[in-house]
Image: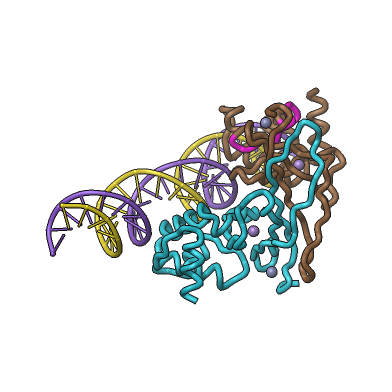
Chain colours: A brown, B cyan, C purple, D yellow
Amino acid sequence: MQETLDHRLEERNIKPTAVRLLVLKAFMAQEAAIGLADLENRFDHADKTTLYRTLKTFEEHKLIHSIDDGTGALKYALCQETCDCAPEDLHVHFLCTVCNKTFCLNDTPIPQINLPTDFSLDSVNMVVKGLCSDCR
Amino acid sequence: MQETLDHRLEERNIKPTAVRLLVLKAFMAQEAAIGLADLENRFDHADKTTLYRTLKTFEEHKLIHSIDDGTGALKYALCQETCDCAPEDLHVHFLCTVCNKTFCLNDTPIPQINLPTDFSLDSVNMVVKGLCSDCR
DNA sequence: GAAGCCTGTGCAACCGGGTTGCAAAAGTGC
DNA sequence: GCACTTTTGCAACCCGGTTGCACAGGCTTC
Ligand SMILES: [Mn+2]
Ligand SMILES: [Mn+2]
Ligand SMILES: [Zn+2]
Ligand SMILES: [Zn+2]
């Protein structure tokens, strides 16, 4: 297990520190996306800034990606092992209106849309709200 | 013109005050969505809170709708006259990465997507980033 | 027209999420 | 051990949004 964690970090060229291993473990332990506040609560000994910077480091190295689901607080989720955070890795995110959990729908690619002429497309953020499987 | 403004407010059961007429005028004068900070700058005599509450009032009465384009500040745009802010009135929003303007793509309905089984859909927020017709 | 009421406005202060500066602590290479 | 880099912790700040409260202005009732 510890092996897996270490390896996952090394793969992305992140030095394994105590905090980082702890945070990664949190990500591996649950499917739903995680926000800074979540981490603060879970590890009440660790400092907010450290956790914040850990998330930033993970994001820079594409171990996790950020999700803006419109709730006001950013959440983060593990990237898939093959993920390069390129346009083709973009996917839909789902926010449950009951439990407030956010999920990556990795198998739901973002559908094409027809922009008005003279608009050129760069990237798309698509967040679906509804009830998750636990809450319906 | 003044007539139009008054009428537009009455249609939505909003009493026409000086500030409200001014704000509505701002919305009618430009296509791009408007944020609270924009209004603060435009009317440097009017108070932030008043403008804030004006936006809230407009939104409650469905004269405008809010747009979270991920820039960190909410923007607002006029609803179409027939709009009831119902699911079928939802549409794609477009954020230009150069001029930072946000537009309603009223003619671009949000495409259907296939959720995993056991997830039920409620609403969708879709923001497209790219270059607008002025900036490309 | 005075008294009372409701709505709208202005100011100040607050809140939460995110971010930065800076110094101490921990790790690394020699 | 010593110099250097990286990571961590604390405090303070920033910005968008929001609330409490007092006052202004308009309308109502007598
Ligand atoms: Mn995701
Ligand atoms: Mn719109
Ligand atoms: Zn749920
Ligand atoms: Zn533009």
| Residue stretch rendered in magenta on the structure | A27-37
The C terminus of chain B - image quarter: bottom right
Task: Give me the residue at 79% from left, 29% from top.
Answer: A5
Is A31 or A92 nearer to us in this picture?
Answer: A92
Picture mark count: 0
Is B63 or B35 nearer to us in this picture?
Answer: B63
Q: Is residue B58 visible?
A: yes
How far across and how far down the image is residue A12, in percent? Answer: 81, 41
Is C2 or B41 nearer to us in this picture?
Answer: C2
Q: Quadrant of residue B73?
A: bottom right
The residue at the far right in this view is: A82
How far across and how far down the image is residue D1, in percent? Answer: 64, 33
Q: Quadrant of residue D2?
A: top right
Reply yes or no: does residue B55 show up in magenta: no
Task: Give me the residue at 83% from left, 32% from top.
Answer: A7
The residue at the far top in this view is: A1
Q: Is residue A85 visible?
A: no
How far across and how far down the image is residue A55, in percent? Answer: 68, 40
Reply yes or no: does residue A36 show up in magenta: yes
Quarter of the rendered image showing ligand 3: top right
Task: Give me the residue at 66% from left, 63% from top.
Answer: B103
Is B56 located above or below residue A80 in the figure?
below
Left or right, A73 with respect to A64, comes to left
Is A15 located above or below residue A88 in the figure?
above
The residue at the far bottom in this view is: B1
Task: Give me the residue at 58% from left, 29% from top.
Answer: A41
How far across and how far down the image is residue C23, in percent? Answer: 52, 43
